[in-house]
Amino acid sequence: MGDVRLMKGNEVIAEAAIRCGCDGYFGYPITPQSEVMETLMARQPWEQTGMVVLQAESEVAAINMVYGGASCGKKIMTSSSSPGISLKQEGITYLAGAELPALVVNVVRAGPGLGTIQPAQSDYFQSVKGGGHGDYKLIVLAPASVQEMNDFVGLGFELAFKYRNPALILSDGAIGQMMEKVELSDYKPRWTDEEIQEISGSWATTGKKSDRERNISTSLDLDSARQEQFNHKLQAKYRAMEENEVRFEKINCDDAEYLFIAYGSSARISQKAVELGREKGIKIGLIRPITLFPYPTKAIQEMLGQVKGILSVEMSAGQMVEDVRLAVNGKVPVEHFGRYGGIIPTPEEVLEALEQKIIGK
Amino acid sequence: MAKFKGAIVVETEKCKGCSLCVVACPTGVIELARDVNAKGYHYAYMANPDACIGCSSCGLVCPDTVITVYRTKAS
Amino acid sequence: MTATTEINKIINEDNLVYKKTNLLLDNEMHYCPGCTHGVIHKVIAEVIDEMDIQNETIGVSPVGCSVLAYNYIDIDWQEAAHGRAPALATATSRLMPEKYVFTYQGDGDLASIGCAEIIHACNRGENIVVFFVNNAIYGMTGGQMAPTTLEGQVTATTPYGRNTALNGHTMKITEMIALLPGTRYVTRQSAETPAAVRKLKKAVRKAFENTTEKKGLSFIEIVGTCSSGWKLTPTQSNEWMKENMFPFYQLGTLKDE
Ligand SMILES: Cc1ncc(C[n+]2csc(CCOP(=O)(O)OP(=O)(O)O)c2C)c(N)n1
Ligand code: SF4
Ligand code: SF4
């Protein structure tokens, strides 16, 4: 057993970053995720691993520092919450356009605008459908526990480097602030210059060696024919992610007649609602998407022969439900249930919604 | 009598005919040609080669760095 | 001896006194005839070559006419979003403290949209070099007003001349930057005459040497022309610059610590 502790989700993000050999963190304070940078500053990883931590002047600067650091082939991350993530969108699309690996964490709070500091899941569209301009995708991981806050930092970097694409951890204020038992990852050393050379030498801007052409980190190509080719290449990459990286969890699905689909905090609540329903004799299952892009479309489709209806549960006015409906394509009824504005639904409410919107219909 | 004799070579096809070298030359060596290059620019050339002292002024100010300068002691 | 044969005798390797540095690539520059960007690129490339730091230098290009600077100088480059070059350079320099990192930015990029990024990079005293090309206009987008546009100056968005009541005052951001304790060397140069180019080159060399000595941020403003934006010929542009820009943007070193 590794290092087991009782920790807050946000603190774990910081701890996991240090332990996975992250080279740099650039951030700007915002509730409910300020503990990430606070933990890093208290831990002073530059003394231990050499990791750079810097409080930037804004989220705009922070994400562009990520772009600069990622251009050097380093493992670079940032974290923020919804309003700050909106500001980072320009930088994120540049990262995607320059094919740079990086990790972004969004500890979501309710909006629109300044909204409230309470948890929400209303940034789903922004995360999986774009957010910034242009045809691009992020790899989106949705943790439902403090343990997954730990695990997905390492996984996020792994996938980001595998595909040379930014990855996003889409968490929320509840998981960020929640204290839970967590088994921390073992320490991995930061990559040496030689390792960076081996892994990213063909593109990282580490200083031009005499044996290669200059490396250029850019998202610009003014030639439309080449730009279209490049977009084809990006799309092929996203299709490969859909092929290889879909992650989800199925709970009580074997005999399920009804299905909840929920991620993150909503999945925890829905799991409770499954138990409550089963106590009443209703055969409910839960599919918990872990990757929101790529989305577990096939896993949902495979359930369509056995289920009579699906409730998509989300702390939003109904965003992920669109992807559920796309997967289901009208074959069974699909409804959305959500509380929003910073309100977390109770398992009872969720079960009641299933009974009224799906079973009772 | 100048102490040095100079000469320049202009990469005519890359010259944009901006005239900055013409103005920079202290001895009035350079003019723009009446002919144009493939891009349509009147390119720079040594109109008065005898006056060149090889001081590199033209080379320094040329934004497109298309001038090479040579210089030797005047015999 | 005929004139041609005499010239041919002078033109040989032994007599070579000025040629393009190998660090400038053969790609033809996309800049307009006479554009100051070309001269500045050349000077930067020459200094990197002479200091033999090609392998250790990373340039950050802006959004503006010099967005494609990476096509001309043979080093590794990062191309930043509009105004954000100092943020990229900050991270690059902190993650690779032994490297030479510079940003190259226009006046719209640095003094307008990227005002926060440059001020804070300067204030933190990042160990980088900043080249700030002030041509008093937005070149790339077709000659609109920049923060540096002079009072009364006609641009595409100040068709009746810049009116301070309507458009705000002309901004001397270099003077502001010199006030910040993180900056060590702040100078304003130009590149319109051979003497100015030689002085500029000395300043560039000093700035990169400050990086070697880990002195902090060196900031070089270059007052330049944009003949397309100003709707003048390149030689007229130099005259206009001397007459109108130099009195307001006085050349010289503001700070050298
Ligand atoms: C976010 C964003 N806003 C606006 C633009 C359009 N744009 C491109 S270059 C430019 C102005 C550049 O002017 P300056 O920095 O003075 O450089 P110059 O072209 O004069 O060298 C603008 C506004 C952009 N590319 N990105
Ligand atoms: S300065 Fe250079 S580009 Fe301009 S006219 Fe002279 S040689 Fe041609
Ligand atoms: S080297 Fe000097 S004298 Fe010769 S052409 Fe150039 S500027 Fe004129």
Image (cartoon, coloured by chain):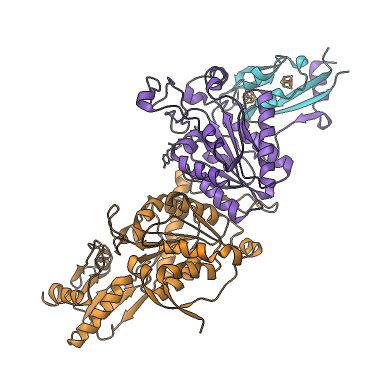
Chain colours: A orange, B cyan, C purple
Whole-percent x, y for residue A297 in the image: 32, 70
Residue C184 sits in which quadrant? top right
Q: Position of residue A108 (x, y in %)?
A: 34, 62
The residue positioned 24% from the left and 77% from the top of the image is A259
Q: C211 or A164: which is nearer to us? A: C211
Q: What percent of the width, then of the height, locates residue C136? A: 49, 27
Q: Residue at x 86, y 18 (%)?
A: B74
- Ligand 3: image quarter: top right
Q: Residue furthest right?
A: B75
Of A252 and A49, nearer the camera is A49
In this rendering, would A134 be left or right of C37? left
User: How far from the left and from the top, in percent, is residue A266?
Assistant: 28, 71
Q: Is residue A283 visible?
A: no
- A235 vs A89, nearest the viewer: A89
| Quarter of the view holding residue B28 | top right
Horizontal side, residue B35 vs residue A155: left or right: right
Task: Assign the C terminus of chain A to one quadrant of the image.
Answer: bottom left
Q: Is residue C134 left or right of residue A34?
A: right
Residue sticking out furthest to the top: B1
Q: Work out whether residue A86 can be spotted.
A: yes
